[in-house]
Amino acid sequence: MPGAIQVTVALLVLLRGAVEAGLLLLNLRHSAAAGGAVPQALRGRVSLETARRSLDYTVARGRFALAHLAWNTALTLVLLFSGVLPWLDEVLARLGLGGATRFAAFLLAVSALTSLANLPFSLHATFVLEARFGFNRTTWRTWLADQAKGIALSLALGVPLLYGAWFFMSATGVWWWVWLWAFLAAVQVLFLWLYPAVIAPLFNRFTPLPDGDLRSRLEALSGDTGFRTRGLFVMDASRRSSHSNAWFMGIVRPRIVLFDTLVQTMTVEEAVAVLAHEIGHFRERHVVKRVAAGLLASLGGLWTLSLLVTWAPLFRAFGFPGPSWQAAVALLALGGAAVTFFLAPLGAWWSRRHEYAADRYSVRHTGAPEAMKSALVKLNGENLSNLHPHPWYSRWHYSHPPLVDRLAAIDAALE
């Protein structure tokens, strides 16, 4: 039985890697075959130079993703089959750690190990790949400060969370996974409330959008659509990157956040259309639906964990002397990713439906389809998004529809 479990898990991890590599290669070949040309539907809207830079960026990111995929696949197999996990658990036991402390220390150590193993890729992505295309504006000082804040925040929030999880696992009987789910759901809602006012300002500055035509138009739009907001803010995104975006923080009365890069490059009409799109997400209750879906997924994951935690052959297959909470969580996290990967197309499809709906909302409430389309073209160009994604790759991974499809959908909505 342990041998069969090992083979099954190894095959799943390798299958996931092979499918992802195949999708990446298909996307690279499909994009390169276009030769940096502007799609017919975008001629007159996108320059040939932007199209060529988009292709170069797509190819560079695709090659980087292939290398990172190979590394992560190998890392997962090493962590699962080398014996390092049971060795680490044994070391903690020899140090006299037990119960919740051993549980938390083990999972924090595994998390730190994987983060360190991926650190070179993170550095390369930021300071080489993004810098090569003019996106990176992060200094070493800012990067180090972000890392220090991230570690401190992870410990401040993660350690109590792990101790809390241990309590519900060990003290609430056979239905521990339901109690733990309720606890984690409450924590997630709390974080959604705390994030705008407490967590996000640790990393970025949020200043009120200055008075002027843009603020007046956005406030009028909020009033016309019945959208109650805690304010309009500009985020200093340009300190780290020249990528552009807009979003809102919170779940009941959110704060509208505009990247300073967006404010600098968009016309008033385009910015209004983008905000109307974000309001569309809120009015259509997309955020609530996604949070609910995430909570259901976590409930399913905890139920799966409840089945695995007492299955002794699983632990013997990976070198553990017997079942333990920390081993079960680590094994499910490492091996489970190979299963959830195949559910990604469903989540991407659902997200793209939300984006189409938000686009329609924007056009309907602003009466400015051309402003929405030009805003999308600008965002696509500023972010050098792929103009020729392979359909299979986009359906598997894209949370937003490709630009050509979004523009066509806006035109179709006007008919």
Image (cartoon, helix red, strand yellow):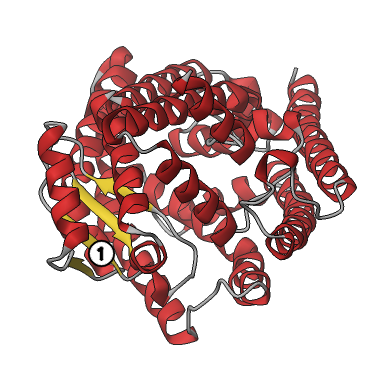
Q: Is residue 300 left or right of residue 282?
A: right
> What residue is shown at x 54% (from left), y 74% (from top)?
136
Where disc 1 sits, the SS reads strand
Residue ID for mark 1: 234
Q: Is residue 142 left or right of residue 220?
A: right
Kindly tell me whether residue 170 is visible in this rendering.
no
**Crowding at label 1, few (<14), some or many (≥20) Cα neighbours within 10 Å?**
many
Q: Quadrant of residue 63?
A: bottom right
Whole-percent x and y of residue 69?
A: 74, 49
Whole-percent x and y of residue 386?
A: 68, 49
> What residue is shown at x 41% (from left), y 45% (from top)?
371
Count of labels in the image: 1
Whole-percent x and y of residue 250?
A: 20, 43
Q: Quadrant of residue 212?
A: bottom left
Whole-percent x and y of residue 378?
A: 51, 55
- Compared to 385, does 400 lie above or below? above
